[in-house]
Image (spheres, grey):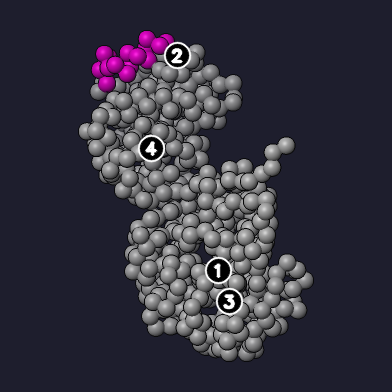
């Protein structure tokens, strides 16, 4: 699902029109897709109310209502700015001829009709305002939205392209913004929908095909997207029947200290759950006795330590055990002792396998001169805002205020994949590709969840997945597992990292319905 600014979408539509896909045809395609989505609800519904403004979203809504009317539905269009749509407007006439009704908000001063129509309809199509709406809203639009807010109704709201009252670039919202259950975006997600507070109003997000040519130049230039289940499933490695553990690679995880032993266990288990063939846990000697029984599937590389923290001499032992390693994670729970920093610096002198750096590993990196030049090509860095601050010297506020631009800039500058964690995690590749997860939940705001994410990414990387795809797929699985854990536990305050880890296998099971498999036929 591509993500665009309103200016980008406007330019794309203009180019499509110039290449023969007219605005009228795009509107027809959008309206038909909207109606088809309504008809796919297995609900027994038969009455739709459309909020119609003067813009393109209003036109899409009129087209959709016309298709629904022809399918036997009772349809009404509640039109604001009705005077601007002439009585002989083709879209209005088509709806009337199909048996639909037209009601003007200008003739409904007290909103009695609106209240009655909302009360009888099964679904409300919100095409009142579009992607070009700016705040503050014009009074007549604000009045309609305010009236809807006080109408006591459980009607299902389907927003056409965006909920009315949202700024589709900044993510700001009007006081009476209409909350949607589902937002059907036309061709692409508008960037403001993946920002707060607007994200709280969009409900689920889906995409409607409006017929844009896939080779349209401006369309192909959009490399920013929101990953979805099908995308992730397509990129998971196949699991052939004749596979052995070597088929799925070996992940070496350098993690843990006496103070943070759980981080190593979470990361290693996650790497196995996402499909790595073998996971070797390289951790300080004291952790072996404490953790080995909790993950008997792991092999161990016990490292020399200084008071429970990996010491510099451990680099020699790691160097002697890299022969079959196909990816390596360093960082979860390591601590930031000087001796551990020297260990990491020594490692960077070696020819390392594909690398993922997380947590304390990032803070250690920040202390090593020219660290980004010493990492293997296309290493994966997984900082939260605080760790990104340590790496860049920027304040956390500077980072949080422009997360996408910051991730993109430093990914290109460093030559590595950056996974900037947080609400709407941003994954940036040096070649300019950007993925933004459409997920923001406090269920993942808990110690240890980042260790699970790092383990998922290194597990995918071990199986031969490219760096960017490993980061995006791992982040998506992690986010969905977080939401599944929230559903299972029932309270975001009570979700633990272990709950998220436990839900990874559920997400993987769902992905297997889409992933390419080699199976026997009977």
Tell me the quarter of the picture where residue 95 sits: top left
Q: Which residue is mark 1?
A: 327
The mark found on residue 31 in the picture is none
Q: Which region shows up in magenta?
A: 85-99
- Report the front residue among 176 and 66: 66
Above or below: residue 57 compared with residue 398? above
Tell me whether the residue at label 2 lies in contact with that at label 4, contact meaning CB atoms closer than 8 angstroms: no
Dot 3 surroundings within 10 Å: few (below 14), some, or many (20 or more)?
some
Q: Residue at x 40, y 11 (%)?
A: 98
In 3D space, how far apart are the residues under numbered discs 1 and 3 (Cα atoms)? Answer: 9 Å
Give the Cα separation between the discs numbered 2 and 3. 67 Å
Query: Which label belongs to residue 70?
Result: 2
Marks 1 & 3, CB-CB < 8 Å contact: no
Q: On the rendered structure, is 166 left or right of 153?
A: left
Q: Earlier in the sequence, mark 4 or mark 1?
A: 4
Which disc, if any, is residue 322?
Answer: 3
Q: Is residue 248 left or right of residue 227?
A: right
């Amino acid at each position: 699902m591509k993500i665009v600014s309103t200016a980008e979408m406007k330019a794309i539509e203009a180019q499509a029109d110039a290449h023969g896909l007219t605005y009228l045809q795009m509107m027809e395609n959008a309206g038909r897709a909207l109606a088809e989505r309504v008809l796919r609800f297995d609900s027994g519904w038969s009455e739709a109310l459309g909020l119609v403004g003067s813009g393109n979203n209003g036109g899409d809504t009129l087209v959709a209502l016309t298709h629904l009317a022809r399918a036997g539905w009772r349809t009404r269009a509640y039109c604001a700015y009705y005077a601007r749509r002439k009585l002989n407007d083709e879209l209005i006439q088509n709806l009337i001829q199909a048996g639909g009704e037209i009601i003007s908000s200008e003739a409904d001063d007290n909103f009695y009709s609106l209240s009655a129509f909302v009360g009888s309809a099964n679904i409300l199509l919100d095409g009142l305002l579009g992607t070009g709406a700016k705040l503050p809203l014009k009074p007549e639009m604000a009045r309609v939205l305010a009236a809807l807010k006080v109408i006591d109704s459980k009607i299902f709201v389907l927003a056409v392209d965006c909920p009315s009252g949202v700024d589709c670039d900044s993510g700001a919202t009007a006081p009476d913004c209409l909350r949607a259950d589902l937002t059907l975006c036309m061709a692409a997600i508008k960037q403001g929908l993946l920002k707060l507070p607007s994200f709280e109003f969009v409900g689920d997000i889906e995409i409607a095909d409006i017929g844009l040519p896939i080779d349209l130049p401006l369309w192909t230039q959009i490399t920013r997207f929101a990953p979805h289940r099908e995308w992730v499933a397509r990129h998971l490695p196949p699991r052939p029947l004749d596979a052995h553990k070597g088929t799925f690679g070996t992940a070496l995880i350098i993690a843990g200290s006496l103070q943070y032993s759980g981080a190593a266990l979470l990361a290693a288990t996650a790497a196995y759950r996402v499909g790595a063939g073998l996971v070797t846990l390289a951790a300080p000697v004291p952790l072996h006795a404490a953790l080995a029984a909790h993950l008997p599937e792991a092999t161990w590389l016990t490292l020399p330590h200084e008071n429970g923290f990996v010491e510099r001499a451990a680099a020699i032992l790691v160097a002697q055990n890299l022969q079959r390693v196909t990816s390596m994670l360093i960082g979860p729970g390591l601590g930031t002792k000087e001796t551990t920093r020297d260990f990491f610096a020594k490692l960077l002198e070696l020819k390392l396998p594909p690398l993922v750096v997380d947590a304390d590993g990032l803070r250690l990196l920040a202390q090593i001169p020219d660290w980004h030049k010493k990492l293997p090509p296309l290493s994966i860095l997984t900082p939260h805002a605080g760790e990104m601050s340590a790496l860049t010297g920027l304040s956390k506020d500077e980072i949080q205020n422009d997360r996408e631009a910051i991730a993109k800039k430093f990914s290109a500058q460093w030559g590595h994949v950056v996974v900037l964690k947080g609400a709407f995690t941003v994954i940036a590749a040096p070649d300019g590709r950007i993925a933004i997860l459409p997920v923001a939940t406090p269920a993942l705001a808990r110690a240890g969840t980042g260790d699970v994410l790092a383990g998922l990414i290194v597990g995918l990387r071990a199986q031969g997945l490219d760096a960017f795809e490993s980061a995006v797929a791992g982040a998506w699985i992690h986010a969905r597992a977080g939401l599944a854990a929230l559903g299972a536990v029932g309270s975001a305050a009570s979700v633990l990292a272990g709950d998220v880890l436990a839900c990874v296998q559920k997400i993987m099971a769902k992905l297997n319905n889409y992933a390419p498999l080699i199976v026997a036929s009977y």
